[in-house]
Amino acid sequence: MAGSGKEWQVHTTWGLKELLEQGQPIFVSERFAIPEKLDIPADRDGEHLEIRVQIENGRARSRRVLIESSTPGGVSATTLRQVPIRNVVATACLSALLKVQTSPDGTVHFMPGPHDAADVDEIRRVVQELVGYVEAGS
């Protein structure tokens, strides 16, 4: 079976410019924002995955999922069942979070990660809410 036993490698090394080109930042907490759209690439053993996500009402919604295979068997039903869409989206959301900083003159600045260790609990909560592991405000 193509790709069995191997993890998907999510390619989310984005700089601030690349993140802001994906869409207008949407505030997901008082201190964090995320681009309104993300195109997420991932690969695994001859298979390529692309997920387009849109942030709506505090949730990351998959709008397009594309999988291509260069393996002899192609894309099988088993391959489709094994695509961990929520995990790939969560990984991308974690990488795409922008810390919001406001300067004394009121200008808002967006700072890409890595973020401070002190932010870990809030980041975990925000990402869990984005991908639906917990309800917003839990």
Image: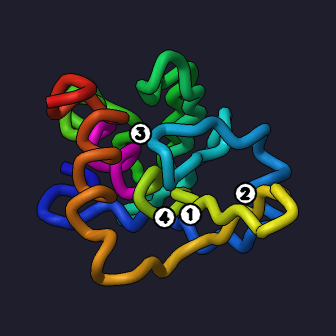
Q: Which residue is mark 1?
A: 99
Q: Secondary structure at mark 1?
A: strand
Residue 126 in the image: x percent, y percent? 33, 45
- Mark 2, other Cα within 10 Å: few <14 / some 14–19 / many ≥20: many
Q: Quadrant of residue 5?
A: bottom left
Q: Which residues make up the magenta segment?
A: 85-91
Q: Identify the amino acid type marked 2.
A: Leu
Tag count: 4
CA separation, marks 2 and 1? 12 Å
Q: Determine whether label 3 and label 4 are within 8 Å by CB.
A: no
Residue 73 in the image: x percent, y percent? 34, 42
Q: 43 and 89: which one is in front?
A: 89
CA separation, marks 2 and 4? 10 Å
CA separation, marks 3 and 4? 30 Å
Q: Is residue 93 magenta?
A: no
CA separation, marks 1 and 4? 11 Å
Q: Earlier in the sequence, mark 2 or mark 1?
A: 2
Q: Earlier in the sequence, mark 3 or mark 4?
A: 3
Q: Quadrant of residue 103?
A: bottom right
- Mark 4, other Cα within 10 Å: few <14 / some 14–19 / many ≥20: many
Q: 124 and 54: which one is in front?
A: 124
Q: Determine whether label 1 and label 3 are within 8 Å by CB.
A: no
- Mark 1, other Cα within 10 Å: few <14 / some 14–19 / many ≥20: many
